[in-house]
Structure formats: structure tokens, C-alpha cells
Amino acid sequence: MQLLPSSATPQVLLVGEGESTRLLEDVLREQGWHTISCPTTFGVLRLCPDTKLELFMELCRQVKFDARTALMPVVFVLAAPCPTSSAEVFTAGADDCIHLPTSDAELVARAQRAVRTKRATDSLEDATAVITSLAIAIEGRDKTTRGHVDRVSAYSVKLGRCFGLSQEQLASIRVGGIVHDLGKVAVPDDILNRPGKLTAEEMALVRRHPVIGYDILKPTRAFREVLPIVRWHHERPNGTGYPDGLSGEEIPLVARIVAVTDVFDAISTDRPYHPAYPPDHCRQILLESARAGDLDADVVSALLEMLDAAQASPSDAAATAPTSK
């Protein structure tokens, strides 16, 4: 059962068929709820025209990973005898699990709680949309970096899957890739776009952008899991990074992943201070940086394997290759 947002009449989408679904529909309609029924997962996320519980759990996982629906409450209603446990359902990302038989009053109360949760989190969705739009607008100040944050985000999510990150971590790294340079809002355009060498004072200003971005996002609960990426994506395993001089595994894996993809995109696309380097040169830079401890060696290795696999598959390569002007 997936609850849909509404400012007035509560709405609910019931996915499934059988007596339990009809019971829920009757109970909720009696309470004045607007119900929409879909007998199978097909047509919801176009998974498969089947009603196996495993497919509903996969549907839940997709709903929770998709940024557009991640905050949508999902409630499972399991009728006896059902071998699936509440723990399995919650692992799939569900917000609640109701076991039948139960009273009509409890059904309505649990549904109303899910709606209250959704309405409370709507403000978080709005904040996320505003901040990510701001991050993309900041990137647009430099024409040569257009598309950079989207590419960093996409590369980072793919690498995160290689390292077995959870759905929550993947969601954080996706957003973190987009907002990692948010603090550059405080860096003047002429410094960002200057092709020549920066002065020590100007470089110090540029190096403050992780802290500035961190300070902007810190009061916002929606970005709590993204803060390590924003603050530490310029930290280095050998301890030479900034702003806090962390080293090794003091740097969270999500930040180490974004650090590698950030560098890769910077060297493989045109910038004011250098043209896009050819693939072999990019590979050499990444490997040398890994040997020196400037980048995480395991993450670099995984990225190179991912790029090799994409090159072997033309469709994947076209989908992930950076574009240089």
C-alpha cells in the first residue's frame, strides 16, 4: 500500500488483489479516503504483470531509491498465512507493515500515521529541490564545467554499487555528487574561470568551498547524510587534502568515491586551465595519484574497470562518456 500526498482528502494507491485489498479499500472509503486500485505491479513501475510478493518488494525498493518518490510512505499489508516477515519488508524499504487480521480502527490509524509522515516530509523534498537547483545554477557560472555535477553523481552511484553501498548510501552519494561544490557560491567568477595560476590568497579562498558548502547544508535535515561528501571530497588518503587533513579510512568511503570521480571528470573534460586529456593520459594520472596516495587506490581501480567495461559496450560508453567542447 503506497500512500499518495494530498493537502485535503487522503489518497491511497492499493497495489495487489484479493480479499485483503478489497477489505482495505472498503474500510478506507468508509472513512472518506480516495482510493485507487492497481491489481499488479505492472503499470506502477512497469516491472512485471505478476502479483508475487517479491515483485512488490522490488517495487518498494525502486520507489525508495528514486529521488522523485523516496519520501513517499510505503505500507505493506500481509494477510495470514504469509511466510514473509516484517523484517524482510522493512529491509526492502517499507515504512510500515500491517499483519491481517486486525481491526478497522488500526488499519485507518496506521494509514493516517503514514499520511502525517508524508506531509511532514514534503518540506524536506522542497528543500532538496531548492538546494540541488542552486548547485546546478552555481555550476552554470562556468561554461566549461556544464554537466560536471551530473556526471560526478552518475559515476559515483555506479561506483557505489561496485562497493556494495546500501540504497540509502547510494541515494546520499547521488545527491552529494550534485551538491559537492555548492560552496563555490562564495568564490568570485573571475577566480573560477581564470586560466592562469591563482595567488596564494585566491587559492585559500577556493579551498574554503567545502566548509562553506557544509555550513550552508548543515542546518537542513534533508542533507544530513550528504555532509561528509560536501566537506571531505577534497581530503586525500595521504593526509595532504583539505579542509581537515584527514587520511586513510578517516575519510568516509562515500567521500573517497566522489573525490575520485570529481578528479576524473576534471581531467577528462575541458577546463579554463587545461584541455580535456585523452583517455590514456587520464588513466595514467589516476594510477599515479593512487600510488602517491592522492586518491583511494581501490576506488581508482574500480573506476578504471568500470570505464573499461563501458568501452567494451558501446551503449554503456555512450551513456557515461563525458563530453568536451
Image (spheres, rainbow, N blue to C red):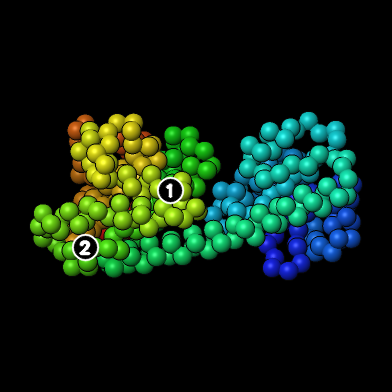
Residue 320 x/y as whole percent? 39, 51
Count of numbered circles in the view: 2
Kind of residue at badge 1 = Val
The amino acid beneath tag 2 is: Leu
Q: For mark 2, give the secondary structure.
A: helix
Q: Is residue 183 left or right of residue 30?
A: left
Q: Residues within 10 Å of mark 1 (few under 14, many from 20)?
A: many
Q: Nearer the viewer, residue 217 or 176?
A: 217
- Between disc 2 and disc 1, whose residue precedes? 2
Q: Quadrant of residue 123?
A: bottom right
What residue is shown at x 50% (from left), y 53% (from top)?
222
The quarter holding residue 84 reads: top right
Q: Which residue is mark 2?
A: 192
Residue at 37% from the left image edge and 46% from the top image edge: 229
Above or below, comparing residue 159 to residue 275 in the picture: above
Residue with the mark numbered 1: 226
Reply above or below: 297 against 148.
above
